Image (tube, helix red, strand yellow):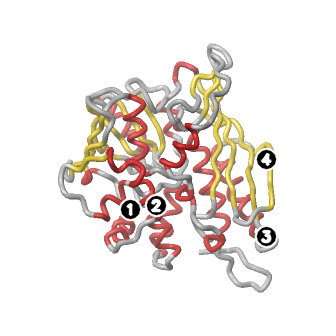
Amino acid sequence: MSDGTSAGDAPVRLTRFSHGGGCGCKIAPGVLQQILARTPAGLLPPQLMVGIESSDDAAVYRLNDQQAIVATTDFFTPIVDDPFDFGRIAATNALSDVYAMGGTPLFALALVGMPLDRLPLEVVGRILEGGASVCRAAGIPIAGGHSIDVPEPIYGLVGIGLVHPDRVKRNDRARAGDVIILGKPLGIGILSAALKKDLLSAAGYAEMVRWTTLLNRPGTTLADMEGIHAVTDVTGFGLAGHLLEICRGSGLGARIGFSRLPLLAEAVEHARAGIATGASARNWSAYGAEVHPEADIADWQRNLLTDPQTSGGLLVSCSPGAAEAVLALFHHEGFEAAAIGTMTHGPAQLAVGLDG
């Protein structure tokens, strides 16, 4: 699963260089909230349409009545051993935030941190090639970047996009009665944990790479559709964490049915066997009090709800009348999207049923 080699021709396992991988290495939600709470307020020009106030996916700055800039950055440590795949996954994940805001990517800047004393230059080059291949697929250039020498491999992008100011898709505009649609299946974090334990099958690895390198292009089209009220993408805080961000921002609750969730089959097998990421436990510690199961939920099911998704799917809150068109859009683009629940009146909390 890796085409990187060391000077002695032994395979280089990128995941052995990092304490965590992919979006699972994000700062825990509770810790991040404490850090941001102590951050002094900055300038808030009227042109800044979206900043840090709602934990949204990207900043949006209005240029004029027809154009707004979408700006975001994302980078992380290796989630896989293959350097080319690592570059592809990191780039796909970074551009997802532009799509989640309804934007069209314009260009990217590369963010590179590598342990040059331990990692062959050929391996570093393959990581960059992987990222560049995704940007070519998205139709954008990598126009520059920055690199440093660090103990752990880090790669990602600054993503810059464009959106009409009236079509920005925020994560805090959901409405009661909306249908909740998830664009990609869950379980990437569990597959990454199985990979580190040498338990992931070749088929499971292929599925992992397939989904983490699938660009969330439908987000751009969602910006032009009627009835799309809120959009985000599911990444390091898991489905439950990012859905709760929609709930808090919108002042609503949500109910989902576990049986309706799209799940990666091998991830379910490993979850049932007790495999999970440390980030999943940190996520539950941060927001578990806001999750209310309607029946007994097993640990493996909870771990899938909190599983950190690297380059995860878009999470859409739309009117019931728009749901069929949204699902058709996803399916046409090769996604296994599903309607998983409903936004509800009430406090900002998540109810989870076992049935639909």
Instruction: Check disc 3: other Cα within 10 Å, few if <14, some if 14-19, many if 20+.
Output: some
Element type where label 3 sits in the image: helix
> Of 334 and 128, which appears nearest the observer?
128
User: Does 102 appear above or below 128?
Assistant: above
Q: Identify the residue under disc 2.
A: 188
Q: Which percent across, then down, holds residue 31?
A: 52, 49
**In this picture, residue 212 sits left or right of residue 290:** right
Q: Tags 4 and 3 in contact by the CB under 8 Å rule? A: no
Mark 4 falls on what kind of element?
Answer: strand
Q: Which amino acid does label 2 sit on?
A: Ile
Residue hosting label 3: 122
Kindly identify which numbered label has been placed on residue 145: 4
> Relative to residue 139, is residue 311 depicted above or below?
below
Tag 1–tag 2 contact (CB < 8 Å) = yes
**How many angstroms separate mark 2 from mark 4 (CA)?**
28 Å
Q: Residue at x 20, y 47 (%)?
A: 356
Task: Label 1, secondary structure: give it.
Answer: loop
CA distance separating discs 4 and 1? 34 Å
Q: Where is residue 298 in the image (x, y as percent from the top left)?
A: 26, 63
Q: Is residue 163 left or right of residue 242?
A: right
Instruction: Specify which label sits upstream in the sequence, 1 or 2.
Output: 2
Foreground residue, 332 or 177?
177
Q: Could you tell me the amino acid type at mark 4?
A: Gly
Spatial CA distance of label 1 from label 3 is: 33 Å
Indicate the amino acid at tag 3: Glu
- The span from disc 1 to disc 2 (Cα, nearest Å) is 8 Å
Please give the label number shown on residue 264: 1
Q: Distance between the residues labelled 4 and 3?
A: 19 Å
Q: Along the polypeptide, which appears first: circle 4 or circle 1?
A: 4
